[in-house]
């Protein structure tokens, strides 16, 4: 079936604006992750959803960042009052029944540029 | 909390030479360990993983990694580099099911002819 889908693929926004990034995981996958990838920083963990459990938000860098997952499927990452340092590629990943060693399936990311 | 350190942000080898990418982890319990690869302009894909059992694990494209608990390491190797191996490689660790997968900062591998 289809892989992890992210939209938009590119987003340019002005400093101070809010943005929403969308992730459609693989159907049936219960775990969903958001990561931020920027030069020299690798993949920075942001947030992790697992089934109906409370999400692990420990990686969110500030209260301007939030995410939700509706109906256990689609997820939206929202960045309020964007800053230039928010410019990065935002990656979403999902995995099947979470056994700890389940591999992640990544989307192609949303490249966010804040001007 | 678990963490990962990848030694060397950039490694350069000649075609046919040994590839060695280093990864050390920190975990309070026996971890699950992974290597992912990102080829230019492509998404991340799983190279290999360690769960339990045999400490030497084999992955795709001739790569393998050895889990050494005493050294808290999970270094990635390939006996003979190919030009197509040029990519960014990420080591990742996870304590157990239900926790986040934490990645290192990545190592860019360059292969010259």
Image: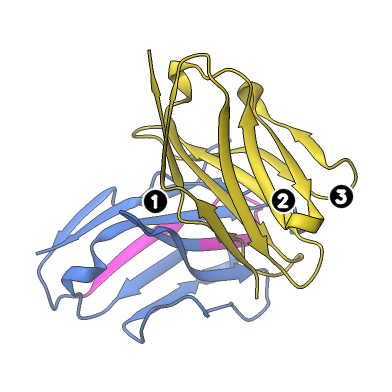
* Total numbered labels placed on residues in the image: 3
Q: Which badge, 1 or 2, is on the more N-terminal residue?
A: 1
What residue is rendered at 56% in x and 40% in y?
A: B21
Can residue A78 be found in the magenta stretch?
no
The colour applied to the residues of chain B in this rendering is: yellow
Task: Look at the picture and state if B29 lies above or below B86.
Answer: below
Number of the label disc, if any, that sits on residue A6: 1
What residue is rendered at 64% in x and 28% in y?
A: B63
Task: Look at the picture and state if A89 lies above or below B10.
Answer: below
The residue to which callout 3 is attached is B52
Counting from the top left corner in percent of width and height, residue B18 is at 57, 24
Can residue A23 be found in the magenta stretch?
yes
SS at mark 2 in the image: loop
Q: Which residues are magenta?
A: A18-33
Counting from the top left corner in percent of width and height, residue A58 is at 52, 80
The colour applied to the residues of chain A in this rendering is: blue
SS at mark 1 in the image: strand
């Amino acid at each position: 079936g289809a892989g992890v889908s992210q939209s938009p693929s590119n987003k340019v926004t002005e400093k101070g604006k809010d943005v929403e990034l969308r992730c459609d995981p693989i159907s049936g996958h219960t775990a969903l992750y958001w990561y931020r990838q920027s030069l020299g920083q690798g993949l920075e963990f942001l947030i992790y959803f697992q089934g109906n459990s409370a999400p692990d938000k420990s990686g969110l860098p500030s209260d301007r960042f939030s995410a939700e997952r509706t109906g256990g499927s689609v997820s939206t990452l929202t960045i309020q009052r964007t800053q230039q340092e928010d410019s990065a590629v935002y990656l979403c990943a999902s995995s099947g029944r979470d056994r700890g060693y389940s591999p992640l399936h990544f989307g192609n990311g949303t490249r966010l540029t804040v001007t | 909390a678990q963490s990962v350190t990848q030694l060397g942000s950039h490694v350069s080898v000649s075609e046919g030479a040994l590839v060695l990418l280093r990864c050390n982890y920190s975990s309070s319990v026996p971890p699950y360990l992974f290597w992912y690869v990102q080829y230019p302009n492509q998404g991340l894909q799983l190279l290999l993983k360690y769960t339990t059992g045999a400490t030497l694990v084999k992955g795709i494209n001739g790569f393998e990694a050895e889990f050494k608990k005493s050294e808290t390491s999970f270094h990635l190797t390939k006996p003979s580099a190919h030009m197509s191996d040029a990519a960014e490689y990420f080591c990742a660790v996870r304590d157990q099911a239900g926790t986040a997968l934490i990645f290192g900062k990545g190592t860019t591998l360059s292969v010259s002819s």
